[in-house]
Image (tube, grey):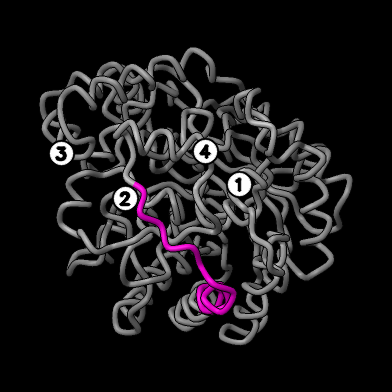
Amino acid sequence: MVRLSAPLRIGDVTVSNRLYRAPVLECAGNGDDAVDRLIDHLDPAAAAGAGLVCQGATIVRGEGGCAAPGMTRVHDDDFVARLGRLTDRLHAHDTTVAIQLEHGGLRSMETWHRGYRREHPGLEQLAVSRPPVPLRALDRLGFLDYDPHVLTTDEVYDLADDFGRAAGRAVDAGYDIVHLAGANMGIVHQFLSPFYNRRDDEFGDGVRFLAAVRDAVRDHAGNVPLMTKVPAETAAPAVIRRRLTREDAVAICRRLDRIGYDALVPVSGSVFWDMSIVRGEFPARAWRDEDFREGYVEAFGGRLRAGLVALANRLQARRYDFAPAWNADLCRVVRDAVDVPVLCEGGVRDRPRIDRLLGDACDAVGMARPFYAEPELPARLLADAEASAVCASCNNCTVPQVAGAPGVCRTPVVLSEAGRLREAGAYDRR
């Protein structure tokens, strides 16, 4: 049995225990208060004992590529240097710090956010290939707005180098691990997926892009440990035949192990950006909230379109209801196939399940949304073998981010329970 308190080696870095804060949107942006906002999000998890804290998806270019409002960019040397204050703060708690690097590609706001599109009329989406037929149909119906620029071979290498340069800046600022956002329909996922990738050059093999990113990271950031999410599109609608099966995902993980990736995070989902990513209840409270209604209208281009998105959200919630540790089976198969650590996240909510997963399905266990309600959650999980997160997987935290709202829990019963635990001293380090 692998203990939660046991250290874990990822590349040349030793993580103090097997519990980590998984990447989740902080919505900190790049303003004068961005570093303070990131500290507010990340420092409580480190102070509470998380062995690894991952800063959420962070964009490698200065223009385009954001999948949601308020995402932080790391294209600017001066700004990234300021992030050293964040890494110093987290290192003081003996916490390993990772940064997740991202570019949204066809998932970017220039595709789906009408207000952003109006403000940036000349901004094209970066595309691996011409958008697939189902997405072009949504464009014709007016739900999405595609004007893609399909990357040339040279431009793919340039994009990989942007990932490498961002990694170099991050290492200079004190980050210990570089984590690629390889799933959830970002551009790395799009390279890997046969649904998106119809290229006829060397990058028609999506792993070649990940190899190019690895080379660029080594050029700019030396031997910093490099990890990535790896998607299996097992939740895709049955009519989508070109997709990543579980077997495909395992084969990709084997190749990434061989080419030098230091840890892997297998995840299952759809070919679309839908609720297979954040399984749980339909967030009725968030859709009704008057504080965000105009933001939804601005994002989706009108009340009717916002209502249709809410309806689609409701239907997806019925299909992708919450399942405890929904990636565990995939992680277990990958762990048997590779020699590097496998990290498991998605639907993990309680310490007994964590203990069962460790050494069986994975080498470390992460949580994301539960930190919105309990920023100091590791203190409870590390101290109490029966502890369970108060998160209700209601998704009322996620939908308002479309309107530019920060990622926080907004469900009264959940916040009340977290408050009760805080008054009882449950988050005090022991």
* Residue carrying label 2: 109
Rendered residue at 34%/67% (across/down): 73
Residue tagged 4: 133
Q: Which of the two labelled residues, at mark 1 and mark 3, occupies the earlier sequence position?
A: 1
Which circle's residue, 4 or 3, is located before the other in the chain?
A: 4
**Mark 4 or mark 1, which has the lower sequence index?**
1
Q: Would you call the spot at circle 2 few (<14 residues within 10 Å), some (14-19), or many (20 or more)?
A: many
Q: Of the residues under marks 2 and 4, which one precedes in the sequence?
A: 2
* Residue 154 figure quarter: bottom right
Q: Secondary structure at mark 4?
A: helix
Number of other residues with Cα within 10 Å of mark 4, as a class: few under 14, some 14 to 19, many 20 or more? few
Viewer-nearest of discs 2 and 4: 4
Q: Secondary structure at mark 1?
A: strand
Q: Mark yes or no: residue 1 visible.
A: no
Mark 3 vs mark 2, CA separation in Å: 12 Å
Residue at point 35% right, 56% down?
66
For the residue carrying disc 3, how many other residues have a C-alpha within 10 Å: few (<14), some (14-19), or many (20+)? some
Task: Check disc 3 and report the residue beneath it.
Answer: 298
Q: What amino acid is labelled 1 in the image?
A: Leu
Is the residue 332 above or below the residue 27 in the image?
above
Circle 1 residue: 19
Verify whether residue 369 appears in magenta: no
* Mark nearer the viewer, 1 or 3: 3
User: Looking at the picture, how far across and down is residue 60, in whole percent?
Assistant: 42, 69
Residue type at the position of mark 3: Glu
Instruction: For residue 49, say whether it is visible.
Output: yes
Over which residues does the magenta segment extend?
Answer: 146-161
Q: Secondary structure at mark 3?
A: helix
